[in-house]
Image (spheres, rainbow, N blue to C red):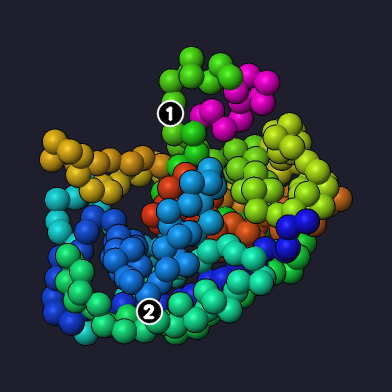
Amino acid sequence: MLSEPVICSANINIIPILDCIAPPFTSKILKYIIESSRELKYIKELLSSSKSFKPIVFTPLLVNGRPLYSRKGNSRFLELKSGTTYNARISFITSNANVSTYIDELMLLTNRFKTPYGEFHVQVTDIEVVHFSYLHLDFDKYFKIRFITPVILTNKLMMPPPLKVHSHKVPERHRLIPTPSYIFNYLIRLWNSFVPDDMRLPKPGSDLWAAYKFGRISDIILTEVDYSIRPETVIYGKTPTGKPKLIRGFTGWITYELLYPKLKPIYSKLLALAKYMGIGRSRSIGFGQVEVYAIK
């Protein structure tokens, strides 16, 4: 039987030595530091994981909680100022047996690093370790999700499992309006991809059908109370031909009311997971980062 997984999450300060121009999506700075390090062996292995759901996520650089990245239509470069403290976070999932090894590696990030984007002081300010069995968002009936960086949810996510073999016949698009079925089908599949069978949701041994049905139920028992959502196209880098590589998703916030309290323990776990590991595609490079709150 697999051991219970844990989430290890570190808050990090990144301080440029000199003024420099950041990459369009600033999570690349921390990602480069880890990929190029000879000492961060185990964390690098998480980055190269072939799992459908990556076990590691980075945020972009943050200033007062606001992520730094370039948007389509804004031709200005992202300039980082010498001596200014920018914040970031790295979170990953591992087994309880290995967590001390990863913490030791995280502490090695407190150092000075040269990158193609400039030279930086890096400081690990705190590390949090949370067992999956303790993941919990304490809310009564209302909760709010704030989508900090663009969330990428494909239209094929809610295709019924027996029809997955035909999914290649449907063009792929990104949803630009969040719906409970897409959010919570994704989160329950993310959860189930890391836990042993007896910890699966919505019940032990659950499969893709159970995740699909839970998504459908979520459209019925969660209702929007308020929202502010906008589509956003961001620049991640350049294509091989030199054109901007564009990624489109949605940002903003939404408040839900839970109409069926019996399922609150499941939503509580999934929302707590989203707080650390995000929602949707490309979480490992900084997309789909969220904050979750209980609303009175």
How many dots with numbers?
2
Residue 65: percent from the left, percent from the top?
41, 70
- Identify residue for label 1: 173
What residue do we see at 50% from left, 39% from top?
153
User: Residue 71 vs residue 292: left or right?
Assistant: left
Compared to 119, does 22 lie above or below? above
User: Residue 63 vs residue 207: left or right?
Assistant: left
Residue 202: percent from the left, percent from the top?
79, 46
Which region shows up in magenta?
A: 155-164
Residue 257: percent from the left, percent from the top?
71, 50
Which label number is shown at residue 109? 2
Compared to 163, does 173 lie above or below? below
Q: Residues within 10 Å of mark 1 (few under 14, many from 20)?
A: few
In the rendered image, which quarter contains the N terminus? Answer: bottom right
Residue 100: percent from the left, percent from the top?
58, 79
In the rendered image, which quarter contains the C terminus? Answer: bottom right
* Main SS, magenta residues: helix
Which label number is shown at residue 39? none
Q: Residues within 10 Å of mark 2 (few under 14, many from 20)?
A: many
